[in-house]
Image: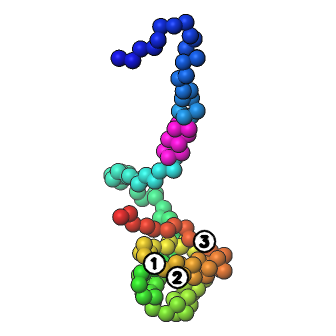
Amino acid sequence: MIQLPANNHRSSDIGFPDLTALLDVIFILLVFLLLTANVAPKALTVSLPNKGAEQAETLEMEKPITITLFAGEERWALDGQEYVNWLVFELSLGERVRALDDPQIILAGDKDVSLERLLQLFSWLQGHNLSAAQVLMQPD
């Protein structure tokens, strides 16, 4: 057991480190990590009642444009249709964007996609004043 010498020194003279600053930093880091952690949304299946179904209205929502980038050779996909030529893909994407009033774009891609092709797509989207609504990533 560790004991302090029995002399008449005050406890502040003994030299215990002040841990207040360390605890403050640890608390701030803990709060930061909790606020920035990605949590997968969980949903429960719900059985809705049939009463009042005749009064329900169907919402017309535009289908989002899904762009897929593949690793390796130059390939893109627009809503499931693959393209191996950027110019053909660009024309198809332009037609699809012009057909919608407020296009919602979802980007999905392999984690090994070249940065050059990703920047090429981002540049095209920025040139047409579009933004990617969502970027899909699959965890390892």
Pinpoint residue 97: horizontal percent, then vertical percent. Answer: 58, 81
Q: Identify the image quadrant of residue 104.
A: bottom right
From the image, tell me which residue sits under label 3: 131
**Which is more foreground, mark 2 or mark 3?**
2
Q: Is residue 44 left or right of residue 123?
A: left
Q: Identify the image quadrant of residue 108.
A: bottom left
From the image, tell me which residue sits under label 1: 113
Pinpoint residue 112: horizontal percent, then vertical percent. Answer: 43, 76
Callout 1 crowding tier (Cα within 10 Å): few <14, some 14–19, many ≥20: some
Assess whether residue 1 is covered by the magenta stretch.
no
From the image, tell me which residue sits under label 2: 117
- For the point 52% across and 90% down, the residue is 86
Point out the stretch of residues depicted in magenta.
Answer: 25-34
Q: Is residue 65 above or below residue 139?
A: below
Pinpoint residue 63: horizontal percent, then vertical percent. Answer: 49, 73
Mark 1 and mark 3: Cα distance apart in space: 19 Å
Which structural element holds mark 2?
A: helix
> In the rendered image, which quarter contains the C terminus?
bottom left
- For the point 62% across and 79% down, the residue is 123
Which residue type carries mark 3? Answer: Ser
Labels 2 and 3: the sequence-earlier one? 2
Count of numbered badges drawn on the protein: 3
Which structural element holds mark 3?
A: loop
Which residue type carries mark 2? Answer: Arg
> In the rendered image, which quarter contains the N terminus?
top left
